[in-house]
DNA sequence: ATTGTGACATACG
DNA sequence: CCGTATGCCACAA
């Protein structure tokens, strides 16, 4: 990573760390980074199209709604990917959201993520 | 330096 | 749960 790490990169790293079959919220990522705010995370993911390794479909808002699906191609792609992971989506909302919720600041606490370790 | 923008979160009623 | 209001802050022009 010779490139300068911007806020986007941090969000990408955390998002890529989300296990399959799990989802997280923008606020959870923002809380883990302890930087910016949830809006910054969503804004960063908006540019995640440049990063094919970033499973942005696993990031939803705190209501469990697939708010970013409109940025996928096609929009239904986001729900399709989630269901492929075994997540049930109903009315653009994740069923048992809190059950599938994966909080980096908790589950990733012991992980040796390379945030700045590069 | 200033302004506009945004895939959100929280508080309150 | 719903609607409204306000805070949030990195980045591009």
Image (tube, coloured by chain):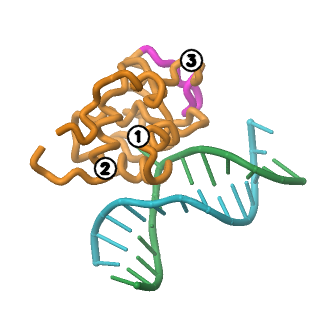
Chain colours: A orange, B green, C cyan
Q: Which residue is mark 2?
A: A8
Q: Which residue is under mark 3?
A: A99
Q: Position of residue A5 (x, y in %)?
A: 23, 50
Q: Nearer the viewer, mark 1 or mark 2?
A: 2
Quarter occupied by residue A57: top left
Q: Position of residue A24 (x, y in %)?
A: 47, 31
Up/down of A106 relative to A76, above or below: above
Q: Residue at x 52, y 41 (%)?
A: A27
Q: Closer to the camera: disc 2 or disc 3? A: 2
**Mark on residue A93?**
none
In three-dimensional space, the C-alpha distance between marks 1 and 2, rounded to whole angstroms, equals 22 Å
Indicate left or right for C1 with A104 as reference.
right
- In this picture, is A94 found above or below C4? above
Of pointers 2 and 3, the one earlier in the residue sequence = 2
Comparing A27 with A51, the one in front is: A27
Q: Secondary structure at mark 3?
A: helix
Q: Position of residue A17 (x, y in %)?
A: 32, 28
Tell me the tag on residue A75: 1
Residue A99 left/right relative to A78: right
Label whose residue precedes the other's in the sequence (1 or 2): 2
Tell me if mark 1 has few (under 14), some (14-19) or many (20+) residues whose alpha carbon lies within 10 angstroms of its own. some
Please check the rendered image and state whether residue A88 is part of the magenta-colored stretch, yes or no. yes
Q: Give the magenta range.
A: A86-95
Q: Nearer the viewer, mark 3 or mark 1?
A: 3
Out of A86 and B8, give the one closest to the viewer: B8
Q: Secondary structure at mark 1?
A: loop
Mark 1 near mark 2, Cβ–Cβ under 8 Å? no
């Amino acid at each position: 990573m010779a490139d300068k790490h911007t806020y986007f990169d941090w969000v990408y790293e955390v998002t890529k760390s989300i296990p399959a079959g799990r989802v997280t919220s923008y606020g959870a990522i923002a809380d883990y980074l302890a930087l910016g705010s949830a809006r910054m995370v969503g804004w960063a993911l908006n540019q995640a199209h440049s990063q094919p390794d970033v499973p942005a479909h696993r990031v939803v808002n705190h209501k469990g709604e697939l708010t970013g699906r409109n940025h996928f191609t096609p929009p239904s792609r986001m729900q399709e990917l989630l269901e492929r992971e075994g997540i049930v989506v109903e009315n653009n909302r994740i069923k048992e959201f809190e059950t599938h919720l994966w909080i980096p600041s908790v589950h990733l606490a012991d992980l040796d993520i390379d945030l700045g370790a590069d």
